[in-house]
Image (cartoon, coloured by chain):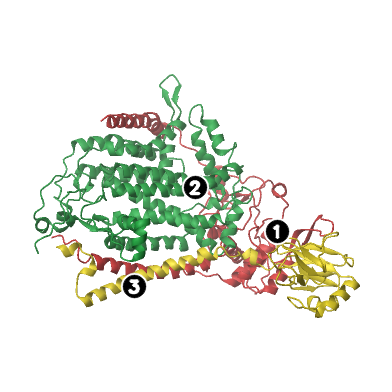
């Protein structure tokens, strides 16, 4: 699949011709991220984060493989081998700080990527599969990040492992044995540390595989764009290379400036001091918090403070612990059905006045509140705030979004991407000869040559 | 409008193209320099770390070694042979000083003045790094009565000099000094 | 349609459970329930601050003050090391403090480290060598607890990274000993428990560590600096910042080189990007 006007790869030298016959890898790259991939011409900077996320994955894999050459997953020495990396290994401090902050930046980039998707409804047909694979990537990232945080075997590592595996103990009947099975013991110890290391090494490559599927699925309908209007003609697109490679190159530079600032000047700002204290199974830190990127979900987990009881009987239907776990997993799993919850025919939040209001004045503040509360100690006013925000979070996706998409009157859409970019007159000029078509995706007609 | 979507090299005059290309070449080569310099930490992290490089010394008490006897010590994670030669062995080694050898050296060069009965060598065959036999009682000492490496059949003489077999060099004599008559400090 | 209906039902249900069983009882309790009790010690805690003028290594251009690190090392050696280990630091690392190789050899030899008798194999002690790590004052955690009223003195290698704003915290802690305001203490019924010491910069103001720096001139600095308590506290806080992150200054210097390069490369990338897009630049009316 591609647009009919997509450029074709033409090997020029004997070597590339031979390679194209035997293993058309250059052709694949050309069609995926080269001149052979036509992309809407109106993408804004929010569309930079897909490529940046891929770059983050590369940073993590490269620095991670290198760190694994010096790290030992044994509870007796794990903490000391991390210090060995920091003190003795050549450039070890830079590699470790890049890996630790790389995880944070990976999440920053992915959160922006996801919220771009929320605002521009990137999850809608024909791009549901891209979205579903994206949610899978996010879940795998969370698992990988959690297990990676355990490896330094500091206090937060240890108690994070204890608490997160403790979530599974909330499951009725099988919960407790499940937690023991996950840890390979009754508390985090060597068995848990070793298997977390093994999986922490494996999962990034699984993520890489799903990322390839994610990009493959993207190339079937092509990229979405800020208007939400599908590509109609060649004048709506530009080739990925050099237009978006150049733009992504610039975006990468800005990203790296921010990243280097953190790595070299504030390397521990996103971490927790307690993780520089070696794991102590006999003493829990005063405030245990997960890494910052889990805070919103941690807030949802803690928001459920009361058991679901039948009033006045004292019979507990669902204990608070299980409610919290259901809600926390549910808050992410519901993203899987998002494409079918929001039935608005219009994609972009720019043309959806009601949706726009709920997004900026509902969802974003709720996420910020959840973020702040997740990192705060479990005391008032954070508990109540997180409860209100949690309630809104579920209402937003599961109730408000389906209803808004039914009742909302969208603003008029531009006829085409070209029109959105150049204005009506110039665009009309550009599409001379193009048939008027509905919002149904790419047209088969090719190459509209405008009158000069 | 076609020029809108055309790649840049298709627009502008010859000179314009060249001037415009310049910035792309500069940007790409700068990115290349950046990428290449990232290789430096990634490669150098595999070199020995500071704790490995930190020079360490080993003290060995040689007073208890009887003539004809050897002991094995450990120096920088490698075996170290310390041998007290018998007068006959010293005579034999000196007699061989002039013999044709792959890596010529005299006994005097391989021991310290006044202590030429103490031979200190690394216990690492210079061929491929096995530990030669001959330091312990009853082991095969090879055809020249010194050390014998069983991996590929290198024969060293009483002064640890390579005499037969594939090894290219004599057993290495590490840097050491006598801190007293009884103790040597290696390293 | 089924998905949407199911979603709406689940959404309403979980929100109802949240509001009815968690939010409303919580809000009711907050409004009408008993106010949460505050620890009386909270009235005495004061957030600590670093030395006036800050440390030499603060900020993006910070550098070690080598003379200060040497003084701080002296304070560690003569005061802290009686109870606190420094297990991730080796004597060879003292080269960073401006000592020569010979000085490090001599300094290492002044410490006694555990060793093994080469003839009998029995545990013994020997003078330290540059490759040795700083020895622990106690053979194990139980001995450390037993000698210190059950409070194990923490290892100090990473202490300034293991506390929030660690260098300043450490300085304020070492200078924060004293007596609580007696009138205020009487009013809230606060008393420092026996065996603990009042320190207004310790999170719960009762610390198990007796004041380590108790009098001016407790150490005699080789460089003649006046060893006041704040001076010693600042010096040892600087030294322990170095032990926690020996690469701190190198890191910042590398950072400037990297940032300079990145700014240049990004500017070029921006120009290149603008050049490529010059023909398709959105010209909205």
* Badge count: 3
Which of the 4 image quarters holds residue C210?
bottom right
**Disc 1 to disc 2, how far (Cα)?**
38 Å
The color chain C is rendered in: red
Q: Chain of mark 1?
A: C
Residue A202's label in the rendered image is 2
* Element carrying mark 3: helix
- In the figure, is residue A319 to the left or right of C190? left
- In the figure, is residue C141 to the left or right of C54? right
- In the figure, is residue A389 to the left or right of B139? left
Q: Position of residue A239 (x, y in %)?
A: 25, 59
- Give the answer, above or below, for where A179 lies relative to A414: above
- Between C106 and A69, the residue placed more toward the observer is A69
- Residue drawn at (41%, 35%) of the image: C30
The residue pinned by badge 1 equals C135
Tell us which disc is closer to us: 1 or 2: 2
**Disc 2 to disc 3, how far (Cα)?**
38 Å
- Spot the residue most to the bottom: B98
- Between C163 and C92, the residue placed more toward the observer is C92
The answer to whether residue B168 shows anywhere in this view is: yes
The chain coloured green is A
The answer to whether residue C54 shows anywhere in this view is: no
Give a yes or no on whether discs 1 and 2 share a subunit: no
- Residue drawn at (38%, 67%) of the image: B31
Which of the 4 image quarters holds residue A331?
top left
- Give the answer, above or below, for where C268 lies relative to A259: below
């Amino acid at each position: 699949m591609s647009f009919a006007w997509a450029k074709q790869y033409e090997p020029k030298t004997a070597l590339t011709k031979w390679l194209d016959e035997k293993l058309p890898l250059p052709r694949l790259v050309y069609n995926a991220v080269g001149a052979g991939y036509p992309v809407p011409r109106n993408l804004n900077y929010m569309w930079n984060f897909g490529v940046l996320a891929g770059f983050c994955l590369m940073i993590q894999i490269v620095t991670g493989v290198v760190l694994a050459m010096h790290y030992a997953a044994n509870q007796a020495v794990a903490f000391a081998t991390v210090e060995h990396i920091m003190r003795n290994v050549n450039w070890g401090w830079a590699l470790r700080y890049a890996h630790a902050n790389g995880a944070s930046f990976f999440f920053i980039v992915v959160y922006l990527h996801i919220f771009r998707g929320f605002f521009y409804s990137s999850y809608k047909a024909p791009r549901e599969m891209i979205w579903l694979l994206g949610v899978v990537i996010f879940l795998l990232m969370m698992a990988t990040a959690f297990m990676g945080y355990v490896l330094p075997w500091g206090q937060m590592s240890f108690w994070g492992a204890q608490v997160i595996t403790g979530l599974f103990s909330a499951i009725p009947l099988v919960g407790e044995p499940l937690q023991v099975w996950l840890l390979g013991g009754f508390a985090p110890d060597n068995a848990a540390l070793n298997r977390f290391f093994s999986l922490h090494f494996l999962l990034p490559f699984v993520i890489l595989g799903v990322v390839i599927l994610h990009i493959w699925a993207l190339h079937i309908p092509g990229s979405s764009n800020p208007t939400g209007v599908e590509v109609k003609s060649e004048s709506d697109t530009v080739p990925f290379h050099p237009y978006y490679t150049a733009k992504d190159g610039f975006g990468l530079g800005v990203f790296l400036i921010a990243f280097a600032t953190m790595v070299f000047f504030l390397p521990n700002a996103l971490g927790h001091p307690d993780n520089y204290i070696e794991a102590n199974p006999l003493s829990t830190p005063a405030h245990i918090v997960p890494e910052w990127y889990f805070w919103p979900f941690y807030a949802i987990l803690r928001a459920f403070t009361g058991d679901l009881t039948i009033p006045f009987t004292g019979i507990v239907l669902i204990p608070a612990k299980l409610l919290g776990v259901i809600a926390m997993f549910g808050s992410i799993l519901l993203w899987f059905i998002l494409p079918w919850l929001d039935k608005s025919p219009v994609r972009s939040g720019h043309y959806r006045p009601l949706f726009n209001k709920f997004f900026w004045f509902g969802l974003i503040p709720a996420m910020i509140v959840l973020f702040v509360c997740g990192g705060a100690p479990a005391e008032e006013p954070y508990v109540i705030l997180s409860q209100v925000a949690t309630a809104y979070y579920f209402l937003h996706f599961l109730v408000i979004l389906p209803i808004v998409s039914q009742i909302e009157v969208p603003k008029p859409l531009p006829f085409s991407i070209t029109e959105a970019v150049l204005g009506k007159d110039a665009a009309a000029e550009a599409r001379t000869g193009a048939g008027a078509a509905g919002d149904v995706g790419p047209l088969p007609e090719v190459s509209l040559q405008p009158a000069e | 409008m076609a020029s809108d979507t055309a790649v840049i090299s298709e627009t502008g005059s010859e000179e314009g193209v060249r001037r415009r290309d310049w910035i792309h070449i500069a940007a790409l080569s700068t990115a290349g320099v950046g990428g290449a310099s990232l290789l430096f930490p990634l490669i150098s992290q595999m070199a020995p770390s500071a704790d490995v490089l930190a020079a360490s010394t080993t003290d060995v008490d040689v007073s208890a070694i009887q003539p004809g006897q050897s002991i094995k010590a450990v120096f920088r994670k490698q075996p170290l042979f310390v041998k007290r030669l018998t007068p006959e062995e010293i005579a034999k080694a000196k007699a061989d000083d002039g013999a044709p050898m792959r890596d010529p050296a005299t006994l005097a060069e391989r021991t310290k003045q006044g202590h030429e009965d103490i031979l200190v060598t690394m216990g690492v065959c210079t061929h491929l790094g096995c530990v030669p036999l001959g330091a312990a009682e009853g082991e095969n000492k090879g055809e020249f009565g010194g050390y014998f490496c069983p991996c590929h059949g290198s024969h060293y003489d009483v002064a640890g000099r390579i005499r037969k077999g594939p090894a290219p060099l004599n057993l290495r004599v590490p840097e050491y000094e006598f801190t007293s008559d009884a103790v040597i400090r290696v390293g | 349609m089924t998905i949407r209906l199911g979603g709406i039902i689940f959404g309403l249900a979980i929100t109802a459970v949240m509001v009815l069983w968690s939010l409303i009882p919580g809000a009711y309790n907050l409004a009408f329930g008993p106010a949460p009790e505050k620890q009386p010690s909270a009235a005495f805690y004061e957030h600590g601050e670093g030395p006036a003028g800050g440390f030499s290594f603060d900020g993006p251009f910070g550098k070690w003050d080598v003379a200060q690190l040497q003084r701080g090392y002296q304070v560690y050696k003569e005061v802290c090391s009686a109870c606190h280990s420094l297990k991730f630091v080796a004597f060879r690392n003292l080269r960073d403090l401006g000592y020569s190789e010979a000085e490090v050899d001599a300094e290492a030899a002044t410490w006694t480290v555990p060793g093994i008798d080469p003839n009998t194999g029995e545990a013994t002690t020997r003078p330290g060598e540059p490759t040795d790590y700083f020895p622990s004052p106690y053979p194990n955690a139980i001995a450390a607890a037993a000698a210190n009223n059950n409070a194990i003195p923490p290892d100090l290698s990473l202490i300034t990274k293991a506390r929030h704003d660690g260098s300043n915290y450490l300085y304020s802690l070492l200078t924060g000993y004293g007596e609580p305001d007696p009138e205020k203490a009487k009013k809230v019924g606060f008393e420092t428990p026996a065996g603990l010491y009042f320190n207004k910069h310790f999170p719960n103001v009762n610390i198990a560590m007796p004041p380590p720096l108790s009098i001016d001139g407790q150490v005699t600095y080789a460089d003649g600096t006046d060893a006041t308590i704040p001076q010693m506290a600042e010096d040892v806080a600087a030294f322990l910042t170095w032990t926690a992150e020996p690469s701190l200054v190198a890191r910042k210097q590398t950072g400037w080189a990297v940032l300079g390069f990145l700014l240049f490369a990004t500017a070029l990338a921006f120009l290149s990007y603008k050049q490529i897009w010059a023909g398709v630049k959105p010209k909205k009316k």
